[in-house]
Image (cartoon, rainbow, N blue to C red):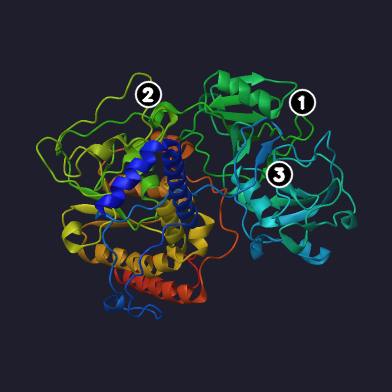
Amino acid sequence: MAKLLVKLQRYFRRKPVRFFTLLALYLAAGSLLFLHAAFAGEPGSAPVPLPGAGDAPELPSLGAVPPARGLPAPAASLAGARRYGPWLKSASKEPAERSKAGDGGGARGRAPGGRATREKEEDRAKYVGCYVDNTRRRALRGVSFFDYKKMTVFRCQDNCAERGYLYAGLEFGAECYCGHKIQAANASEAECNMECKGERGNACGGANRLSVYRLELAQESARRYGSAIFRGCFRRPDNVSIALPASQTMLNMSVDKCVDFCTEKEYPLSALAGTACRCGFPTTLFPLHEREDEQLCAQRCAGEEYESCGTADYFLVYQTQVQDNRCMDRRFLPARSRPFVALASFPGAGNTWARHLIELATGFYTGSYYFDGSLYNKARRGKPIYEQQRRPRLLTPTNALRAPRELPAGARLQGFKGERDHWRSGRTICIKTHESGQKEIESFDAAILLIRNPYKALMAEFNRKYGGHIGFASHAHWKGKEWPEFVRTYAPWWATHTLDWLRFGRNVLVVHFEDLKRDLFVQLKRMVGLLGIAVFEDRLLCVEGQKDGNFKRSGLRKLEYDPYTPEMRKMISGYIKTVDAALKLRNLSGVPDDYYPR
């Protein structure tokens, strides 16, 4: 063997070019194998089968709970998280964005085949008709994107709704246009005769013809108009000069002019009242909680015929880009000044979002049972750092009361500054945790228990695991063996997590994620009450205007198919029944009605 090595050494010493060539080929082969593994997704190990997974489980039959989030686990691959999707273009020169290209559209977003059924209002959108389109003057003048292979009605509706537009239109079977107003005339239904490229049997417009849908969900989310967010139509407040102190008469009124005026005056609200533009803050005098029918505000603007400008009695309100600073101050508590309160949830149930809301509402930092570098470093100089292993930290004299290091000059920390404090330091208002063991639960004096629909929570956590806090799992992960294994392992944990906190927790306040989204003001007030903080209502109104935070997924890559099999649904339905019964046994309201059929 030694002689052979000596001969090889002499050979390559005489011909070094061949040596470096072989070395380069070796490295290239290794790189190709690495890229292949990244695109295919890292295979996970098969979990232990869980007993009673197919039936409505009782507490003892929930099976083994997966390891706590604090324990070391194989790092999830982030590669390929954003590989798929066509390009987007904006008519207003907005930056290009990426959108998911799935395999076929979901049934509830598809355009019905016949005209009679097209007029039927669906869950997602309502078909309004076929319209003329012109390349020089578009009927819908917002963002547009094309996909000449996989365009579906669902994808077009989803992308437009996510950006806050009221209308979505499809043309040439492959083009999608978004807008707030239809600025064109009707055309014959027969002229919208091209099939969608991604699904047969559904019409996607025609040659210079748009199949237009009104997005019903856009009314529930934050609709946008350029840089402004549409808040709705509201009755004129009493003491209007106090509620909206800045005003100006505009004979040539338009949405842009009023929004620009209020932005220059540094107010977060812009209210159009016919020919008057008013500006102010959301306050108890004008809380923006009781929305009126938009038809009451449907008076045409003098400066733009396709826009509404409200009336003297009903204001059309937009939120400008001006930041409401009334709820932006945050600081640490004096050390050990309050009891330990847990913000407990199953992974994917909205814990990070709830932390953002609590920090804005109370003015104090929240802590964590783990240290997550991506949450601490979010958007530092615009460069978020990838997630680190989540693990509980040992309490030492050096980190018990250690203040986070100062940021470099010019840097702005938009993550959670309390992330670096040890969870028992006592300097944070509450502690994020996903733990569900008796010992861990009993270490807290009180808890806010956040519960979310398991179907949504499982998908959110799967995206986080394989795509990061604001990323998405790749198509290969959803279609591979990772997703079924994940559901079999994590679905029982969703139930045991809630049951353990109800059983071992002290002074537990149950908050449903769906209720928090639906009525943020009321639910956040309950949460702040448990924390023992006196908060003015104006501060909570400020939170409502900045509720999204920095860790919200864009939603542009929602799956166009249902990833849950009938067997998965049967299993999860049983867990939902168990949790629902446990809540009602403690005289609490059961799970919300919008959980999937139980």
| Quarter of the rendering containing residue 383 | top left
Task: Of the two numbered discs 3 and 1 on the same chain, state the one appearing first in sequence.
Answer: 3
**Considering only vertical position in the picture, is 52 above or below 461?**
below
Q: Is residue 446 visible?
A: yes
Residue on which the image places disc 2: 411
Looking at the rendered structure, the kind of residue marked 3 is Gln
Report the residue at 34% width, 70% height from top.
Answer: 47
Q: Which mark is residue 385?
A: none
Tell me whether circle 2 and circle 1 mark residues in contact (CB < 8 Å): no
Secondary element under disc 1, as helix, strand or loop, is loop
**Considering only vertical position in the picture, is 5 above or below 252?**
below
Secondary element under disc 3, as helix, strand or loop, is helix
Looking at the rendered structure, the kind of residue marked 1 is Gly
Q: Nearer the viewer, mark 3 or mark 1?
A: 1
Mark 1, Cα crowd under 10 Å, few <14 / some 14-19 / many 20+, is some
Q: Is residue 142 left or right of residue 80?
A: right
Tell me whether circle 3 and circle 1 mark residues in contact (CB < 8 Å): no
Coordinates of residue 25 in the picture (x, y in percent): 47, 45
Which residue is nearer to you in this view: 497 or 24?
24
Coordinates of residue 508 in the picture (x, y in percent): 26, 57
Task: Of the two numbered discs 2 and 1 on the same chain, state the one appearing first in sequence.
Answer: 1
| Quarter of the rendering containing residue 89 | top right
Looking at the rendered structure, the kind of residue marked 2 is Ala
Residue on which the image places disc 3: 295
Secondary element under disc 2, as helix, strand or loop, is loop
Residue on which the image places disc 1: 303
Q: Nearer the viewer, mark 2 or mark 1?
A: 2
Coordinates of residue 578 in the picture (x, y in percent): 35, 74
Task: Of the two numbered discs 3 and 2 on the same chain, state the one appearing first in sequence.
Answer: 3
Mark 2, Cα crowd under 10 Å, few <14 / some 14-19 / many 20+, is few
